[in-house]
């Protein structure tokens, strides 16, 4: 379905998009990695117990299956807010990819 058609249908139903329209002009996705074998993974948690457990399990599975060079685990300061710029900058400078989750 075309983007315009989707917007029209959402409008007809009285729905609003949760996506910031300016987000696409400010940010772009990182290029896709061809492989993660031997890479450094970042694991960004939200300070909730189940998020930490889930991320630890994902980290262990990725390390087992792809022999990560390293895994950097960090929590953002406040679970309900975006990660602070210093956390994002640190992960971006140290890691080849980042896994994040929200879990209660």
Image: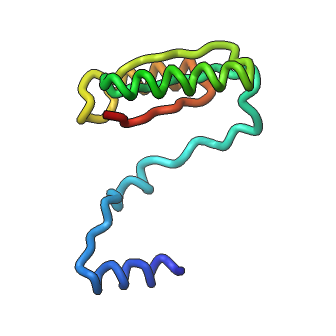
Instruction: Report the quarter where the C terminus lies.
Output: top left
Count up the numbered dots.
Answer: 0
Q: Residue at x 24, y 26 (%)?
A: 78
| Residue drawn at the location 46% of the way across and 33% of the way down | 100
Colour scheme used in the picture? rainbow
User: Residue 85, relative to residue 34: is it above or below?
Assistant: above
Instruction: Using the rendered view, name the quadrant where residue 11 is placed.
Output: bottom left
The residue lying toward the viewer, choosing from 80 and 96, is 80
- Name the side, left or right, on which 80 lies relative to 86: left
Q: Position of residue 38 (x, y in %)?
A: 74, 20
Foreground residue, 57 or 84?
57
Q: Position of residue 64 (x, y in %)?
A: 70, 20
Q: Measured from the top left, where is residue 23 in percent x and y?
A: 38, 53
In front here: 50 or 22?
50
Expressed as whole percent of the image width and height from the top left, the position of residue 75 reads 37, 20
**Which corner quadrant of the image does residue 58 belong to?**
top right
* Residue at (43% x, 79% y) in the render: 6
């Amino acid at each position: 379905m075309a983007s315009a058609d989707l917007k029209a249908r959402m409008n007809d139903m009285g729905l609003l998009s949760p996506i910031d329209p300016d987000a696409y002009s400010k940010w772009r996705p990182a290029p896709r990695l061809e492989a993660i074998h031997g890479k450094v993974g970042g694991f960004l948690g939200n300070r909730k117990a189940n998020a930490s457990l889930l991320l630890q399990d994902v980290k262990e599975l990725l390390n087992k299956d792809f022999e990560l060079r390293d895994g950097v685990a960090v929590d953002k300061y406040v679970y309900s807010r975006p990660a602070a710029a210093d956390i994002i900058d640190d992960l971006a400078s140290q890691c080849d990819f980042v896994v994040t989750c929200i879990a209660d």
